[in-house]
Every structure is written in structure tokens, then in C-alpha cells.
């Protein structure tokens, strides 16, 4: 394998394998489903033992059948992209140098949430605004990772919005906050990030407009109002308006 141009596994918005040293992209229809599931599982789970992989990928068949299915899937992967999977001992892993979009996103998100991380490279990557993990896949291990990544995405965007606002990068802060809102329109903490960004920039009317829109959305969808945290936040905006009018 040419590690100068390593393969890249994409799991957001569907499975794809970019084999860069051959300038080809293997989409879902180019690999058997068992091979896709093996690559995806290794991309998400690191270096699991063979038994654990077989049990996760083929949970409804006897162990020997699951092990046989794993051997078949591994053979198909190695035939399609030789060297993609590192086989050593009783464990499997993607070969060193193979890139995975979920891992890149996770690294970015953890840096975004790190209060000590510099802001220079905290721009929102395209991957954080894309769709869900492996849409149409309903394996338990996929569902758990999908929800984990959804939560991670929202927390990272909210944290990034606050850090950008504190640094005076208000336009980027608002965009990051609204990206979190788009991920989950009923998530109050995302809407609070929007309001805080507007208030930090001194746009009180924008903050009030964002609050009103969220208030109406909650009322229509859930029949409830914002929490005390949101109410106290917007009271600050009213105080600023009163002070400005004096």
C-alpha cells in the first residue's frame, strides 16, 4: 500500500472507500455488504478482537458461522484493497495511515471542546455539517455510534460558538451555533448559544428574535416553554434594551 496516498474511509452520509493510490472511490455498490460492515466496524471501533467483531457483525448466527462470515468478509476486503486491514494476533484493525472521516471529526470535536485549545484551527469542518452516520444501517453498534456522534457534534458546535464569540469572531460564532440548531432544532442549549453570540456582539434585537422563534417552536411542537436558563439569558437582553433607551 502506498502510504503517501493512504485510503480514506467515509462513513458520514453513507459508506465510501477512497483508494487514493489507485485514484478510485469504491461506493457501497462496489463492495459486498459484509466487507463494508467489516471496514466500517474497524473504522469506528479501533482494534477489536476477532471474536468480538464476529459477534457484533453476525449476532444472530452460531459462533462458528459468524467466524466463517468474518473470514469471508476479510478475504473480500483484502482482495479489493490489499493491505487495508492489519491482521495480527487475534485482533483486526485498519492499517496505519488509513484515514477515517469519523476519527477526523472526533479529533476536531474534542479540540473544539477543549478550553485550552487555540482557535486558529477551530473552523467548522464540512464533515460536521453533513448527515448522519451510515444512514440506512440499523445494526446496534451503528445506532449507538450514530447517537454518540450526534451528541458530540452538537456539544462541539455549541462550545465552538462560545469560544468564537469570546474571541470577537461573532459571525463565525453565529454560524456555528446555527449549525447546532440545524442538527437538533428543539435543542435549547443550541438556541442559547445563538442568543449568547448575538448578545456578545451587541445585537440585542437579534437575540430577542432568536428567543421568540425558539419560544414559538417549543410551544407548537411540545406545548412547553423555554427553561429558566433561557429565560434568565433573555432577561439580560431586556435589561440592555432598557439601559440603552435611557
Image (cartoon, grey):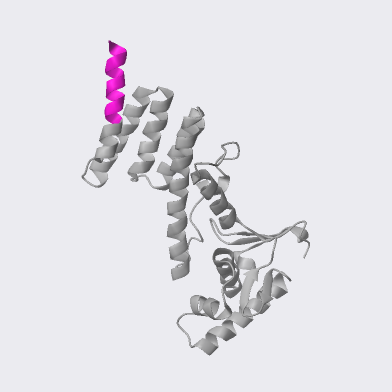
Residue 20 placement: quadrant: bottom right
Residue at the spot 37% in from the left edge and 32% down from the top edge: 195
Q: Can residue 139 be seen in this view?
A: no
Residue at the spot 70% in from the left edge and 74% down from the top edge: 78
Magenta region: 234-246
Residue 102 placement: quadrant: bottom right
Please say whether residue 165 is one of the residues in the magenta stretch: no
- What residue occupies the far front of the structure in this picture? 116
**Which quarter of the rendered picture does the C terminus lie within?**
top left
Please say whether residue 240 is one of the residues in the magenta stretch: yes
Q: In this view, does 117 lie to the left or right of 238?
A: right
- Nearest the eye: 203 or 27: 203
Residue 1: % across, % down: 77, 65
Q: In this view, does 49 lie to the left or right of 4?
A: left
Q: In this view, does 77 lie above or below 178?
A: below
Q: Is residue 141 left or right of residue 218?
A: right
- Nearest the eye: 137 or 30: 137
Principal SS element in the magenta part? helix
- Nearest the eye: 52 or 115: 115
Residue 168: % across, % down: 50, 27
Residue at the spot 38% in from the left edge and 41% down from the top edge: 190
- Nearest the eye: 89 or 193: 89
- What residue occupies the far top of the structure in this picture? 246
Residue at the spot 63% in from the left edge and 70% down from the top edge: 93
Amino acid at each position: 500500500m502506498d502510504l503517501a496516498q493512504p485510503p480514506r474511509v467515509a462513513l458520514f452520509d453513507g459508506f465510501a472507500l477512497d483508494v487514493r493510490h489507485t485514484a478510485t472511490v469504491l461506493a457501497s455498490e462496489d463492495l459486498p455488504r459484509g466487507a463494508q460492515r467489516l471496514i466500517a466496524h474497524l473504522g469506528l471501533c479501533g482494534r477489536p478482537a476477532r471474536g468480538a467483531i464476529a459477534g457484533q457483525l453476525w449476532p444472530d448466527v452460531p459462533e462458528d458461522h459468524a467466524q466463517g462470515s468474518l473470514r469471508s468478509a476479510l478475504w473480500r476486503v483484502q482482495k479489493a484493497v490489499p493491505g487495508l486491514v492489519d491482521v495480527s494476533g487475534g485482533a483486526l484493525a485498519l492499517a496505519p495511515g488509513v484515514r477515517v472521516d469519523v476519527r477526523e471529526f472526533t479529533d476536531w470535536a474534542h479540540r473544539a471542546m477543549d478550553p485550552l485549545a487555540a482557535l486558529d484551527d477551530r473552523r467548522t469542518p464540512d464533515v460536521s455539517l453533513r448527515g448522519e452516520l451510515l444512514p440506512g444501517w440499523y445494526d446496534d453498534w451503528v445506532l449507538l455510534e450514530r447517537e454518540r456522534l450526534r451528541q458530540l457534534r452538537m456539544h462541539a458546535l455549541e462550545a465552538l460558538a462560545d469560544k468564537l464569540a469570546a474571541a470577537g469572531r461573532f459571525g463565525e460564532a453565529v454560524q456555528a451555533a446555527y449549525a447546532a440548531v440545524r442538527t437538533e432544532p428543539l435543542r435549547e442549549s443550541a438556541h442559547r448559544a445563538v442568543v449568547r453570540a448575538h448578545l456578545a456582539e451587541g445585537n440585542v434585537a437579534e437575540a430577542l428574535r432568536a428567543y421568540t422563534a425558539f419560544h414559538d417552536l417549543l410551544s407548537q411542537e411540545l406545548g412547553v416553554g423555554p427553561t429558566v436558563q433561557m429565560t434568565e439569558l433573555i432577561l439580560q437582553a431586556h435589561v440592555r434594551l432598557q439601559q440603552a433607551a435611557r
